[in-house]
Image (cartoon, rainbow, N blue to C red):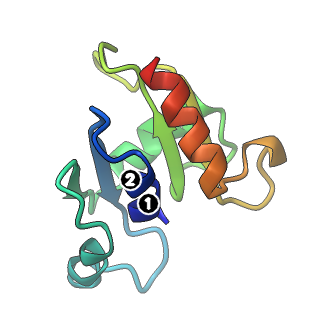
Amino acid sequence: MVQRVLEKLEGEPIEVFVIWIPAIGSDRFEATENAMTLIPDERARHYWDGSQALGEALSPSLGIRAKMAWDVYVVYDGAVDWGDSPPQPVSWLHQKAGEDESLTLNEERLVEQLREALK
């Protein structure tokens, strides 16, 4: 889905950071190497966060009830200063049951949020 979103935004000046986090028992770095091929766009950079540090840091800034945020799609202004912890995003979406349904991920919603952030 992320690759399709990027194709719809071809030529737009966006940077995508794909952070792979071991959220369930079968998540391993070796498996992410194959998954990375699903998002080959040159604007996407892939990282492995084996310690789950980013997921744990994001959770409070997004207001997620779980200790760790994962399966989230977060949009930041390009000029935002991260400082010591993640700042508030411009927008974000998730795929987690039990969270705000108005923020549930779908492809068109993500495209709209990215287009809005690019204005």
Secondary structure under tag 1 reads: helix
Q: Which residue is mark 1?
A: 2
Q: Position of residue 75 (x, y in %)?
A: 47, 33
Q: Nearer the viewer, mark 2 or mark 1?
A: 2
- Amino acid identity at mark 2: Leu
C-alpha separation, residue under disc 2 versus residue under disc 1: 6 Å
Residue that appears at 38% across and 56% down: 7
Secondary structure under tag 2 reads: helix
Q: Position of residue 65 (x, y in %)?
A: 69, 44
Q: Which residue is mark 2?
A: 6
- Decide which of 103, 110 is in the foreground and name it: 110
Picture layout, residue 38 above or below residue 42: below
- Decide which of 76, 11 is in the foreground and name it: 11
**Residue 60 in view (yes/no):** no
Residue that appears at 76% across and 61% down: 97
Residue that appears at 32% across and 54% down: 18
Picture layout, residue 50 above or below residue 29: above
Residue that appears at 32% across and 55% down: 19
Residue 57's label in the rendered image is none
Total count of labels: 2
Q: Position of residue 76 (x, y in %)?
A: 42, 26
Q: Is label 2 in contact with label 1 (beta carbons under 8 Å)?
A: yes
- Amino acid identity at mark 1: Val
* Residue 11, quarter of picture: top left
Q: Position of residue 12 (x, y in %)?
A: 32, 36
